[in-house]
Image: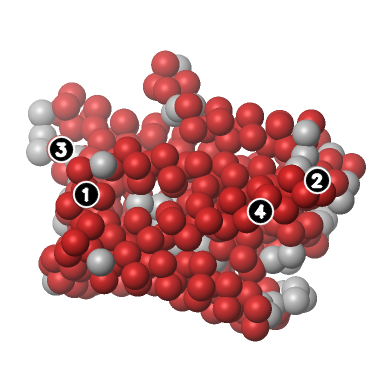
């Protein structure tokens, strides 16, 4: 039970507190405009720092283990979207929530938690770093492309030219600029990892506050009942359960080493809140972002809890059996 509660770190509580603040005191008028500009600036800085953080050596080393990375990418950008299309067409699922569920499945994998859980489970940490980094890098391009394709097919409005320009200006351009400047600023970013954490989490909280505030003003909580929340939670749990089982089966079918099998299971089953929040802010109208992000936020909490427990199980079983840690998957 103590391990379960340890998952609820300060950021998770801050996220819940931000939603509560946006519900009670949503940004309106001039303050809403100011908060929106501030959130946009935070996103630009966030992707700039992520670009500076990405090592080219890690990219080249990671390319050597291409079967594993292709399997992770296939789970992230193929298996998940197929499941998302299926869940979004289930009878009784509200169209707004269906759009959010589908958007969730189009996001890249997480970085920090994928690596952390792989380490706890005694998997191939170096491969996890590469897989998670590749997923986030490709997600800047693939997620908007999949949104344009699948959400239009699903009855949505798709992605406008202005949204594509927003992705290029707010996300891709700062990322590329940061990576190009890595020889000069990479050392500083590496020595001040806490700076990236502050920018990362601060920008997410700002976007969540502005997005949920706009949605509250538009009547979000009059449209979302406790039954709707319960349904979303069950669908997110079902989605995660299917992917965890599928990645386990795929690893066995590919005869991956136990270390790499752990990487596939943890990197291939995650969806990034850090990428999803800014992308939703760029791709969708302000009044829709809150509803779109609701499944993303719920899935984020569920994946943290489930994968923390699973990673601890693998690590503890290795210790009890006295085997090599990676032989427990």
Q: How many marks?
A: 4
Q: Nearer the viewer, residue 144 or 193?
A: 193
Q: Earlier in the sequence, mark 4 or mark 3?
A: 4
Q: Residues within 10 Å of mark 2 (few under 14, many from 20)?
A: some
Would you say 130 lies left or right of 78 here?
A: left
Q: Earlier in the sequence, mark 3 or mark 2?
A: 2
Q: Which residue is mark 3?
A: 325
Label 3 sits on a secondary structure element that is: helix
With respect to residue 310, does 169 lie above or below? below
Residue 67 locus on image (x, y percent): 23, 71
Would you say 181 lies left or right of 213 here?
A: left
Q: Nearer the viewer, residue 1 or 256?
A: 1
With respect to residue 308, does 173 lie above or below? below
With respect to residue 217, does 1 lie above or below? above
Q: Residues within 10 Å of mark 4 (few under 14, many from 20)?
A: many
Q: CA distance from mark 1 to mark 3?
A: 34 Å
Q: Residue at x 69, y 66 (%)?
A: 284
Q: Earlier in the sequence, mark 2 or mark 1?
A: 2
Q: Which residue is mark 4?
A: 36
Q: CA distance from mark 4 to mark 1?
A: 28 Å
Quadrant holding the C terminus: top left
Q: CA distance from mark 3 to mark 2?
A: 53 Å
* Quadrant housing residue 89: bottom right
Q: CA distance from mark 4 to mark 3?
A: 47 Å
Q: Which residue is mark 1?
A: 188
Q: Nearer the viewer, residue 181 or 75?
A: 181
Q: Which residue is mark 2?
A: 28
Residue 253 locus on image (x, y percent): 29, 65
Q: CA distance from mark 4 to mark 2?
A: 10 Å
């Amino acid at each position: 039970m103590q391990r379960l509660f340890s998952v609820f770190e300060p950021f998770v509580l801050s996220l819940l507190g931000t939603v509560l603040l946006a519900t009670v005191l949503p940004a309106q008028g001039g303050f809403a405009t100011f908060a929106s500009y501030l959130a946009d600036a935070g996103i630009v800085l966030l992707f700039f720092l992520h670009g500076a953080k990405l090592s080219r050596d890690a990219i080249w080393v990671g390319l050597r283990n291409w079967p594993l990375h292709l399997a992770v990418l296939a789970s992230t950008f193929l298996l998940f979207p197929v499941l998302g299309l299926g869940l979004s067409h289930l009878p009784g699922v509200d169209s707004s929530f269906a759009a959010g569920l589908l958007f969730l499945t189009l996001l890249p994998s997480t970085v920090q938690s994928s690596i952390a859980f792989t380490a706890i489970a005694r998997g191939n940490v170096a491969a996890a770093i590469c897989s998670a980094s590749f997923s986030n890098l490709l997600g800047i391009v693939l997620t908007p492309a999949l949104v344009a394709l699948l959400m239009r097919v699903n009855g949505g409005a798709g992605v406008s030219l202005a949204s594509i320009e927003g992705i290029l200006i707010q996300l891709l351009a700062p990322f590329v600029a940061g990576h190009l400047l890595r020889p000069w600023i990479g050392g500083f970013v590496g020595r001040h990892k806490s700076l990236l954490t502050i920018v990362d989490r601060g920008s997410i909280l700002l976007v969540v506050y502005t997005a949920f505030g706009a949605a509250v003003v538009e009547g979000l909580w009059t449209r979302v009942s406790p039954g709707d929340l319960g349904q979303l939670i069950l669908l997110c749990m079902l989605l995660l359960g299917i992917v965890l089982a599928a990645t386990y089966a795929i690893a066995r079918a590919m005869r991956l080493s136990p270390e790499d099998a752990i990487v596939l299971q943890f990197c291939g089953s995650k969806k990034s809140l850090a990428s999803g929040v800014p992308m939703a802010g760029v791709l969708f109208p302000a009044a829709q972002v809150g509803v779109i992000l609701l499944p993303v936020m719920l899935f984020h909490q569920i994946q943290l809890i489930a994968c923390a427990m699973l990673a601890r199980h693998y690590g503890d079983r290795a210790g009890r059996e006295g085997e090599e840690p990676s032989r427990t998957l």
